[in-house]
């Protein structure tokens, strides 16, 4: 156990070692400054602008920035939807995948455009290689880049003085995928290939098992999608087993690289914020709050997984029950990863808005699974998604400053700018819209025959299956308890709607706040200014995130994972 803890602490150190220089690099990229990749990539960037007819120096107000993002995302959705519907008659289809039904194509297209990557189908059989490469892999880059553009625009809104412009969406989008996502994905994909991750245009290979049975194994262009899947916090798996499949995640090195990839850009963006604000301590505060929340959640997940289920006993040679689930809860886990790596992966994927899994989330002990669900419900701000984690946590920072000002009579200011009623209304709308979407859709599901029919399990675990599905969809995470039959028309439609609400009912208020804050004057700190670069503010920020999440979702969790935990100790299993 001590070794497990040391490894987890070491992982945190790796995140810092990778995130800090990456954050400084991204600050230069989004400022349009020269980097070590500029000689190679600048001609490509200029060519992209010429082809698109874009002037990267022409800045936009928040309304133009938001409309550009929405129109571009809608175009991406339309193209992907048509590709999914028509894949059966298109080339590069060695598995003979048929076109998706309208509801499944809607759900899948929305999923990949919103950076959720929820999959209600088996990747290796449900889609063609053309869809995987032209549809999913491309969208993995673009949806992640879209999140990064919003984060950078929000930073500009907080740090610029008396202006109406927050940047150029097309320039930010191009720089995101060209200078950040693409180079890193190429390097990571090559590492995956070196470790045995599959990369081929073949459809399947056959092998003889030890028993002499012929086994057909699906293959395809896996490594290239795997790299951006984790780096862009996308999470959609080429295979139905996702990163538990040895063709996606073959070795301990690839497992470590995957969890590190999920946190690299979200962590790095906190330092990008510090550099662009000209106050690195502000970025450090955001990073520290995220790290505290992450390790607290990881401790809960690992602790309850290590304790195991008291009702599952090991029977010795004398047929006498011995230690309860000796070694901890290994149900639903790969033996090659064990409890520690599975807990770290589960905590990271739910904190990072990724959704990739290397074990069955539904097989976690009740409170471990509940903690994973809470990571998402907090707003995906515990590092969170690429871009979305930072702007989500900054929204909470504005709330924390406003609350602190009310409590102690200090001026509610952030980075020298006063926070007014308009910004607070928009911030609260963004947060409450997500919570309301999760709870309303869950209530609809558990009160309708179509929703109840999808449960694999009765009782509180069945409620957790449904609640987790909508939490994951609205939170743009994409992971699932896997016990829910989400391939029905009811769930493909409602979860698809939830993904749209979770993405755009948050992004639009964020950009509106950015436009409002950019117009404000920046005053020097005074004795009446509440400091936002101290350890006290870290504690306040963590408290605000937890209180809002706990108060909003605790009644639902009390009927789900909390009740299941107590029933488990009373001897009742589901």
Image (cartoon, rainbow, N blue to C red):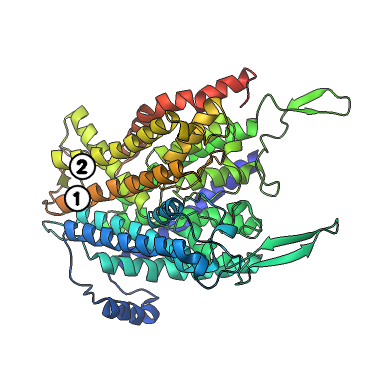
Q: Residue furthest top?
A: 570
Q: Are marks 2 and 1 in contact (CB under 8 Å)?
A: yes
Circle 1 packing at 10 Å, graded few (<14), some (14-19), many (20+), is: many
Picture disc at residue 512: 1
- Helix, strand or loop under label 2: helix
State how far apart marks 2 and 1 are (Cα): 8 Å
Q: Earlier in the sequence, mark 2 or mark 1?
A: 2
Picture disc at residue 57: none
Identify the image quadrant of residue 191.
Answer: bottom right
Q: Quadrant of the C terminus?
A: top right
Residue 286: percent from the left, percent from the top?
Answer: 35, 46
Residue 530: percent from the left, percent from the top?
Answer: 21, 38
Is residue 347 something one can see in this rendering? yes
Picture disc at residue 426: 2
Left or right: where does residue 551 sit relative to residue 332? left
Residue placed most toward the observer, 115 or 85: 85
Left or right: where does residue 11 sit relative to residue 198? left
Residue 262: percent from the left, percent from the top?
Answer: 48, 54
Identify the image quadrant of residue 275.
Answer: bottom left
Circle 2 packing at 10 Å, graded few (<14), some (14-19), many (20+), is: some
- Helix, strand or loop under label 1: helix
Left or right: where does residue 39 sit relative to residue 194? left
Q: Residue furthest right?
A: 318
Q: Quadrant of the N terminus?
A: top right
Residue placed most toward the observer, 114 or 313: 114
Identify the image quadrant of residue 75.
Answer: bottom left
Is residue 380 something one can see in this rendering? no
Task: Answer above or below: position of 49 versus 399.
Answer: below
Residue 139: percent from the left, percent from the top?
Answer: 42, 63
């Amino acid at each position: 156990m001590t070794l497990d803890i040391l490894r987890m602490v070491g992982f945190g150190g790796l995140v810092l070692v990778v995130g800090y220089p990456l954050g400084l690099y991204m600050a230069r990229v989004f400022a349009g400054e020269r980097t070590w990749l500029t000689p190679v990539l600048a001609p490509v960037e200029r060519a992209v602008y010429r082809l698109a007819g874009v002037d990267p120096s022409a800045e936009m107000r928040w309304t133009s920035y938001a409309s550009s993002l929405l129109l571009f995302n809608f175009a991406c959705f339309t193209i992907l939807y048509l590709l999914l519907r028509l894949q059966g008659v298109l080339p590069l289809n060695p598995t003979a995948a048929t076109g998706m039904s309208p509801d499944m194509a809607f759900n899948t297209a929305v999923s990949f455009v919103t950076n959720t990557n929820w999959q209600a189908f088996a990747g290796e059989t449900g889609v063609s290689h053309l869809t995987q490469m032209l549809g999913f892999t491309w969208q993995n880059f673009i949806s992640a880049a879209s999140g990064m553009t919003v984060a950078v625009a929000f930073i500009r809104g907080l740090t610029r003085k008396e202006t109406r412009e927050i940047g150029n969406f097309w320039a930010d989008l191009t720089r995101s995928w060209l200078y950040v996502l693409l180079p890193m994905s190429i390097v990571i994909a090559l590492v995956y290939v070196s470790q045995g991750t599959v990369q081929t245009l073949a459809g399947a290979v056959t092998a003889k098992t030890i028993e002499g049975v012929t086994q057909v194994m699906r293959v395809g262009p896996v490594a290239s999608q795997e790299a951006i899947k984790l780096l862009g916090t996308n999470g959609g798996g080429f295979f139905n087993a996702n990163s538990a499949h040895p063709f996606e995640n073959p070795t301990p090195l690839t497992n470590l690289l995957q969890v590190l990839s999920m946190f690299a850009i979200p962590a790095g963006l906190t330092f990008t914020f510090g550099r662009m604000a000209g106050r690195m301590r502000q970025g450090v505060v955001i990073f520290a709050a995220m790290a505290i929340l992450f390790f607290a959640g990881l401790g809960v997940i690992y602790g309850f997984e290590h304790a195991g289920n008291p009702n599952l006993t090991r029977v010795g040679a004398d047929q006498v029950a011995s230690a309860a689930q000796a070694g901890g809860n290994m149900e639903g886990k790969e033996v090659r990863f064990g409890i520690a790596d599975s807990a770290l992966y589960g905590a990271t994927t739910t904190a990072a808005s990724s959704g990739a899994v290397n074990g069955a989330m539904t097989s976690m002990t009740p409170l471990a699974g509940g903690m994973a669900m809470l990571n998402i419900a907090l707003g995906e701000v515990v590092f969170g998604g690429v871009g979305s984690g930072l702007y989500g946590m900054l929204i909470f920072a504005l709330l924390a400053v406003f609350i602190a000002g009310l409590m102690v009579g200090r001026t509610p200011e952030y980075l020298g700018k006063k926070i007014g009623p308009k910004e607070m209304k928009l911030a609260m709308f963004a947060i409450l819209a997500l919570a309301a979407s999760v709870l309303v859709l869950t209530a609809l599901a558990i009160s309708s025959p179509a929703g109840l029919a999808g449960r694999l399990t009765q009782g509180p675990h069945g409620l957790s299956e449904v609640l987790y599905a909508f939490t994951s969809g609205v939170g743009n995470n994409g992971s699932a308890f896997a016990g829910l039959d989400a391939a029905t028309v009811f769930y493909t439609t409602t979860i698809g709607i939830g993904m749209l609400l979770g993405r755009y009912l948050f992004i639009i208020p964020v950009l509106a706040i950015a436009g409002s804050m950019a117009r404000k004057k920046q005053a020097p700190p005074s004795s009446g200014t509440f400091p936002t670069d101290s350890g006290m503010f870290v504690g306040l920020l963590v408290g605000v995130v937890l209180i809002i999440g706990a108060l909003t979702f605790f009644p639902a969790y009390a009927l789900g994972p909390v009740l299941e935990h107590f029933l488990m100790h009373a001897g009742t299993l589901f």
